[in-house]
Image (cartoon, grey):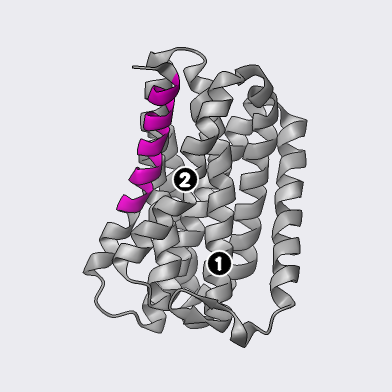
Amino acid sequence: MNEVLLVFLYALFTAVATGFGAIPFAFVREISERVTAYSSAIAGGLMLGASFGLVAEGTVYGRGETLIGALLGVAFILVTQLLLREYDSQDLVFGAATGEGAKKMLLMVIVMTVHSFAEGVAVGVSFGGGVTLGAVITIAIALHNVPEGVAISAVLRPQGVSVARCAGWSVFSSLPQPLMAVPAFLFVETFRTALPYGLGFAAGAMVFMVLVELLPEAYEHGDRAQVATVATLSAVGMVLFQQWL
């Protein structure tokens, strides 16, 4: 099989794996404020845990570059929020949600989609070291993408989005992975240089969104101690899961 096609198919597999994160929400019948709070806590914890892994991986390629990327990620979210404020929040529509709910959903999809660019580059760069290394990294990222799909669905499902659409949006957020993997494979040295910036960017954007959007809403609708516990356990679980990979 052509090497470029092989890289694309492997990376496409990682994108599809993200959709499996919606499956647990098929068993949640009632979407109450309590469920919404704990869903936001789970999403926030998973994103924080993933961010720690991104920073750790980024520093392998460059500490200063990772830090600059993280600052750019924070700036990206601030600019995105500023642009969204130009619209009347009640007029904003995303899927089945409107107003602030639609804003949060849109930010989540944007952040996770941007995050996927860095993962796509990681897949392509890894294939530069051979098919065996590329396959191992691809499987690791695919497994890592499942809890990311959980995080996305945890935000979308309480807003009335169907499980099928949650899976669809999760896969959509990871489509940059197959799109970026091929050029990263073909121009591996160039993309290797940019990788720490991308990893830092994704981490900064995710952490900022968790602190500004997800956890404040979770605290508003749920018990603070319980929300903090769920978020902490989710973050630790995500870190341990990444270490296991």
The front one of 214 and 189 is 189
Q: Secondary structure at mark 1?
A: helix
**Spot occupied by residue 177 in the image (x, y as percentages of width and height):** 49, 39
**Spot occupied by residue 169 in the image (x, y as percentages of width and height):** 42, 59
Residue 230 visible? The answer is no
- Marks 1 and 2, how far apart in space? 16 Å
- The residue under label 1 is which amino acid type? Leu
Structural crowding at the residue carrying mark 1, measured as other residues with C-alpha within 10 Å and reported as few (<14), some (14–19) or many (≥20): some
Instruction: From the image, tell me which residue sits under label 1.
Output: 106
- Residue 76 occupies which quadrant of the picture? bottom right
Which span of residues is magenta-colored? 4-20
Residue 158: give its label.
none
In the picture, the quarter occupied by the N terminus is: top left
Instruction: From the image, tell me which residue sits under label 2.
Output: 175
In the picture, the quarter occupied by the C terminus is: top left
**Spot occupied by residue 78 in the image (x, y as percentages of width and height):** 74, 62
Q: Secondary structure at mark 2?
A: loop
Query: What count of labels does the image hold?
Result: 2
Structural crowding at the residue carrying mark 2, measured as other residues with C-alpha within 10 Å and reported as few (<14), some (14–19) or many (≥20): many
- Main SS, magenta region, reads helix
- Residue 121 occupies which quadrant of the picture? top right
- The residue under label 2 is which amino acid type? Leu
Is 8 magenta? The answer is yes
Residue 110 visible? The answer is yes
Q: Residue at x 58, y 61 (%)?
A: 210
Please say if 129 is above or below 104. Answer: above
**Spot occupied by residue 139 in the image (x, y as percentages of width and height):** 36, 31
